[in-house]
Image (spheres, grey):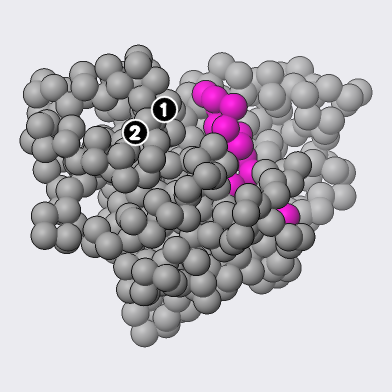
Amino acid sequence: MAGSPRRKENGAMGDSHTAMQYRKLPHGQERISVIGLGMGSIHEGSEEEIEQTVRLAMERGVNYFDMVASEEKPYTCYARAFAGHRQAVYLQMHFGAVYHGGRYGWTRDLSEIRHTFQQQLQLLHTDYTDMGFVHCIDEEDDFHSIMKDGLWDYMKGLKQDGVIRHLGLSSHDPAIIRRFLDTGLIDMVMFSINPAYDYSTGDYGIGSVADRGLLYRECEKQGVGISVMKPFGGGQLLNARTSPFRRQLSKFQCLQYALDRPGVLTVLPGVRGRADLLEVLGYLDATPEERDYTVISEFAPQNADGICVYCNHCQPCPQGLNVGLINKYYDLALAGDVLARGHYSKLSVGADACVQCGHCEARCPFHVKQEARMREIAAYFGASAAGNP
């Protein structure tokens, strides 16, 4: 990538390609690419391939990069790719990931965390990180040690000094994320989202279908963005032999599923090189049919049946109701989001316009009783949405 690449109006850099999509961080001005880049597999390529992959990602509009690798090797490659373009990218750096002997490990030793963070800033020729995350916190005891042993205070101090722009954490446990939500100090979380985990299968599928769905709505309600790790379930979902459902899903289906969860801003698939990256970016060109993940209704467990996942497979409604969005605002209101009623009131067509024709129920892959839901929602919100008689 010779010279300084051109940034388009939508934030992308380089020659014309299918436009990247962006979502705004609620507690900030950052517009984050819906496809970001994870580092878990990129060490498998040569240093030249790693650098060229990162450059290609930026050229295609990717601007959000997770900064935890399986080996130390990729960091110098990222540094070369980012040189001169630091303001064009958002970095998600983790406090607790370390690399003894070049291999990934983690620690809660504050002095070691300080040293590693300063080293990474120097290597990347920057004096700040956009996202400062407590790394991989999945246990209650770990949460208490972080709060009392100085790490959280250290990170809050960096936030006050502008060295961390936004605080957050990575976790697989909804209960731990709620602990941090209660602090009122975080703007972003990294969480494992895919159909297998949401429907209570796989090693990281912590929490019930309802509990995980509620967490996504709680994050959205509080303006906390979600970056998604493990969107393909470690690759298991992409092969019928390894999928816990014994059914294969495509990368496009998994990406769309994650991006449809409330609160999600970006998905961070791991790639081994440019070929993998281009395959993932094919999502932007994919048809609605290629992205359609409602096949999961065929193998979702019984406790997922009857739950609206806002997939809008029921569309179009003959009366013009946005059934998924109406359900979403209702669920958010029940979760305590005081803004949800206002959002609902701005809909051009509300739940009270439902004529109980059964069109949506006939098309719903999750067998949601939408006719009853629309009556329930209309009664809950009372007054008609704007524009209804």
Q: Residue at x 70, y 26 (%)?
A: 344
Q: Nearer the viewer, residue 20 or 245?
A: 20
The residue tagged 1 is 166
| Numbered badge on residue 132 | 2
Q: Nearer the viewer, residue 231 or 300?
A: 231
The magenta segment is 18-33
Describe the element under mark 1 as helix, strand or loop. strand
Residue farthest along the front direction in this orientation: 3
Q: Residue at x 67, y 62 (%)?
A: 284
Q: Residue at x 83, y 22 (%)?
A: 386
Tell me: 316 left or right of 73: right
20 drawn magenta: yes
Q: Main secondary structure of the magenta part?
A: loop
Q: Residue type at mark 2? A: Gly
Badge 2, how many Cα within 10 Å: few under 14, some, many 20+? Answer: many
Between the C-alphas of marks 2 and 1, the distance is 6 Å
Q: Nearer the viewer, residue 56 or 149?
A: 56
Circles 2 and 1, Cβ within 8 Å, touching? The answer is yes
Q: How many marks?
A: 2
Q: Work out whether 68 lies above or below 388.
A: below
Q: Is residue 150 visible?
A: yes
Q: Quadrant of the N terminus?
A: bottom right
Q: Residue type at mark 1? A: His
Q: Residue at x 47, y 55 (%)?
A: 81
